[in-house]
Image (cartoon, grey):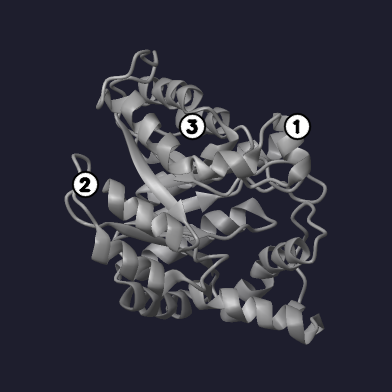
Amino acid sequence: MIPLSVLDLVPVREGGTLGDAYAASARLALAAEKAGYNRFWVAEHHAMEGIAGAATSVVLAHIGHATSTIRIGAGGIMLPNHNPFVIAEQFGTLDALFPGRIDLGLGRAPGADGRIARAFRKDLHGAAEYFPQDVVELRALLTGDPPLPLSATPGLGADVDLWMLGSSLFGAQLAAQLGLPYAFASHFAPDHLDAALALYRQNFKPSAALKQPYVMPAMTVICAPSDAEAERIASSQLQAFVRLRSGSPGKLPPPIENYRASLPAPALAMLENIGQASAIGSPETVRDAIGRFIRRTGADELILAGSTFDPDARVRSLQLTMTALSD
């Protein structure tokens, strides 16, 4: 079986607090470590009351102290929002605290609208155009190749694994040119998955960090003892997705029985589209769906997303999934 990893949005549920969300993520990371998952990533989102990972490096420090061996990282840092020097310092600090365990996934989308751009006091559209140069600069700040006039301390010499993230062909092309491992956000944007992986593999140039292409697509995975229970638990994630795409995001809602039956045709079509990169069901159902996805993508590793209203349900989902795939 290929390695499995975890993507956590640090969800804030209805009736819950930020403190609850951070505590649940730390418990989830420890459970993932015990179950044998390879890495635990947190994603950067801003001004979303249902997602608590905005200060990503701070959240990672919290998770690092709750665990001991699992790799932890950003999936990802939206680099147009930041100065590469500051990110080098932050992740250099994380590497000093948790040596040999830090991943840094980089994305081009700002993950923010115009209001956030004003709050950041940045031209995010313009910053996105400089994304390739910023990635190269950040890598140089960490590796010292090429040498820069000013060293990041901490940062220079840090053992941080850089990844390129993407949901389109742009990230695939850049990851190939720079010889970086590539993670694709197929759990919410699967349309360009096959083309992006093919482009990445065809154009990959070996680097000092990576000799062969390495891809890690994302899946939404919710596993429970039965298909019916998994579908009920997954309805919280599905509601959140429909609300987000409808322009009314909020905190993670409680599950609803037969949620799909209540939806109009456009919303059902939207869920059907993202469902091509999901596995919701019993251990047998999830094992079969993941197996088909691996055969489709030739993935070297999978990263599993999927928020649940009850944090214990996500812990159980990870445990059942790992057991099902290990049998």
Q: Position of residue 282 (x, y in %)?
A: 51, 76
Instruction: Tell me which corner region of the image, top left, top right, bottom left or bottom right, holds residue 162.
Output: top left
Q: Position of residue 189 (x, y in %)?
A: 55, 67
Q: Is residue 207 above or below residue 279?
A: above
Q: Is the N terminus in the top left, top right, bottom left or bottom right quadrant?
A: bottom left
Q: Earlier in the sequence, mark 1 or mark 2?
A: 1
Q: CA distance from mark 3 to mark 1?
A: 32 Å
According to the picture, the residue beneath numbered tag 3 turns out to be 66
- Which residue occupies the foreground of this view, 159 or 99? 159
At label 3, the amino acid type is Ala
Q: Which is nearer the N-term, disc 2 or disc 3?
A: 3
* Residue 100 showing in the rendered view: yes
Secondary structure under tag 1 reads helix
Q: Secondary structure at mark 2?
A: loop
Quarter the C terminus occupies: bottom left
What's the residue at 40%, 45% (across, down)?
Answer: 33
Q: Nearer the viewer, mark 2 or mark 3?
A: 2
Q: Position of residue 106 (x, y in %)?
A: 46, 43
Query: Mark 1 highlights which residue?
Result: 119
Q: Is residue 180 visible?
A: no
1 or 2: mark nearer the eye: 1
Disc number lying in front (3 or 1) = 1
Reading the image, the residue beneath label 2 is: 210
Mark 1 crowdedness (10 Å alpha carbons): few <14, some 14-19, many ≥20: few
Tag 3, which secondary structure? Answer: helix
Report how far apart the C-alphas of labels 2 and 3 lie in the structure: 29 Å
Q: Contact, CB < 8 Å: mark 1 with mark 2?
A: no
Indicate whether 1 appears above or below 179.
Answer: below
Q: Is residue 259 left or right of residue 317?
A: right
